[in-house]
Image (spheres, grey):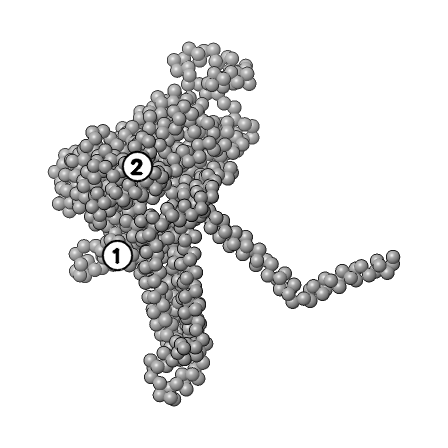
Amino acid sequence: MKSMKRREFLKTSAGVAAATAGPLIWVKDAEAQWSNAPEKGAKLRVLRWKRFVQGDEDQYLANVKKFSEKFGIEVRVDAEGWEDVRPKAAVAANTGAGPDIILSTNDDANLYPDKLVDVTDVCTYLGKKYGGFYPVCDPYLRPDGKKWIGVPLGVAGVCMVYRESHIKAAGFSSFPKDADGFLKLCKALKDKGTPPGFALGNATGDGNTWVQTLVWGFGGKLVDANNKVVIDSPETIKALEYSKELYATFVPGTLSWLDPNNNKAFLDEQISLTNNGISIYYAAKTSKDPKVAALAADINHANMPIGPIGKPSEFQLFFNQMIFKYTKYPKAAKEFLRFMMEAEQMDPWVQAAIGYVTPALTYYEKNPIWTVDPKHTPYRDSMKNMWPSGYAGKMGYASAGALADFIVVNMLAEAASGSKTPKEAAERAQKRAERYYKV
Amino acid sequence: MNSARVQAPVHEAGVLSRLLESRNFLGLIFMLPAAVVLLLFLTYPLGLGTWLGFTDTKIGRGGEWIGLENYEFLWGDAVTRLSVFNTIFYTVVASVIKFVLGLWLALLLNKHLPFKSFIRAIVLLPFIVPTALSAIAFWWIYDAQFSIISWTLVKLGWIDRYIDFLGEPWLARLSVIAANIWRGVPFVAICLLAGLQTISPSYYEAASLDGATAWQQFRYVTLPLLTPIIAVVMTFSVLFTFTDFQLIYVLTRGGPLNSTHLMATLSFQRAIPGGALGEGAALATAMVPFLLAAILFSYFGLQRRAWQQGGQDK
């Protein structure tokens, strides 16, 4: 199929291609060639999620401008709150009209795979050139293991965000790597009057990420590989018992926390530890309030603690890039995604957002942003450490619905707060999940 | 030939002018624009919503008729049941308090106060501010870390830790109800005030000549004459409260532990972020019987003529 493309290309632009194709065969990575002829007079509309850090938007739009200038293709970029993109993308897929390209989140591409343009050529090219996509991209965007239905962008990495001085004061020289050490740290922090805080309300981003990570880390999972609901398991109960001890160390009020609460509380110095993207650090660094700006020096990050299963089990907010079949300019759209993922654009973009998005191609681990400030480094590994949404089952309506209904977050909140016993909470989650996975 | 040609236009004009003089026809014509708007933007979406409730439509995928399956599913769903309870509790408590406070406020405003019109204008403020904005203000007031109420009480030394307004299930329910009451009282008060001003002072004069006490005047003059207004105002108030969405969505998104999920918010959560359009539509449709019951209650319960005329039910 790749050679087909190349042959087509050779036919269309014979002269130039013939001259360059010869020497290129001898290049080591000969496969990583891209040939595409965007439609004449193409115009593109892109819908993406609204930035969390200003640098992201600025550089993204600068890259878009560069694309327009180079290819003469006009691109209009609209941005919506990330939770609003999902229903819009679904409606676009359903009605067959809307933006040509949508940058959406999590399981979305699996809800309407047959409405999406096959982008295997783009992904193969990018994969070859940039060291391949992380394997976790497959369940999201290559569900059959062969055909790519979207181009993986990356994740909004979530790490532990903590106050260096408070950790030291609590008697820890470095941030603990495992669940046991983490619990000890939280207890010590509470004793020192500088408690941690993690969202347990219906917080789509911050709630889901740390809760799924914790449950997976103990071996609990919502479904097995056959989409059979298995959340009511001894492993889950262990995770819930652990969460009960952990919850006792939290600042009061986390049951009501939505996505913004932990950022506010952390920047107001009411908590010394939470889970978040790099946006807290970014906000502190760029703050005009000298008190908040001074915090930046004391903020540090660590990867999510590893549970008893002995390996990272992070849940992260995944971003995809989908081209819809109704587009009149599929080739221009592919060109756009290819262009945006190339190092000349991606590297400055990642830097401008100080690593808010961890790209899905392994090559970008080398981006200097991860090492220029050691506090950025943990976010580099967010793609490497993550497990797919709906683990260990397949993605689709059931996994998306179960996640949106906060089944796992509610379960942990019930057990942690003591409003239900761990067993009761797990049984309830089992029943709720079974309704989505229709037994 | 000639006469026929002359006659034809005369005949047509006759039909047209006769039609234009017909009250029924004119009535229909004048109602047509409103009817089209209602059919297009009210009946059609309502019908579509009801139909979706009987299908397994997902966002991005058409559905098939599945009969009552959605309703069976919702009937057995603990979160849905909790949301029904929350909605009824929320509506009943908030409506009763809104009525009592609103009536009280109306009676106060009906008296001769200094700066009367200024005060009346101020009272309307909570109702005028967009709900989403006042909800954000309440979000800060109830915040677990930044609550002004907790801060004041702590500074006064009355409590030693911040109140977890939106973190405890029952406290959260009461907190969102308080916010709803704050927002809803002005509507009730201003409407009832309008009703109070239509009551002729001569009734009160007559009553006081007969030696009626203030309470008796209220009970046998004010209240009966006010019931038609009360019926309308409370119907609207109950409908607004029952279908509340913005306040909950901003304050709690239905948390903690789904204890403030109303049917409207849960319906949204299932239908849009969750993608189960059919199920969400079924849940929304399930609100209709409750709303009808509320309307029927206020019409048959509060619109009794005998009572309005100061008599007793027979």
Q: Position of residue B28 (x, y in %)?
A: 62, 62
Kindly identify the amino acid type of the residue bearing the numbered disc 1: Leu
Residue under the point 24% across and 53% down: B168
Kindly identify the amino acid type of the residue bearing the numbered disc 2: Val
Instruction: Judge by depth and name the residue closer to the eye, B118 or B104.
Output: B104
Q: Position of residue B269 (x, y in %)?
A: 37, 47
Q: Position of residue B180 (x, y in %)?
A: 35, 60
Indicate the secondary structure of the residue bearing disc 2.
loop
Q: Say left or right for B228 vs B35.
A: left
Residue under the point 18% across and 54% down: B161
Instruction: Find residue B30 and name its label.
Output: none
Indicate the secondary structure of the residue bearing disc 1.
helix
Q: Residues within 10 Å of mark 2 (few under 14, many from 20)?
A: many
**On the image, numbered disc 2 is attached to which residue?**
A229
Image height of B264 relative to B200, above or below = above
Nearest-to-viewer mark from 2 and 1: 2
Tag 2, which chain? A
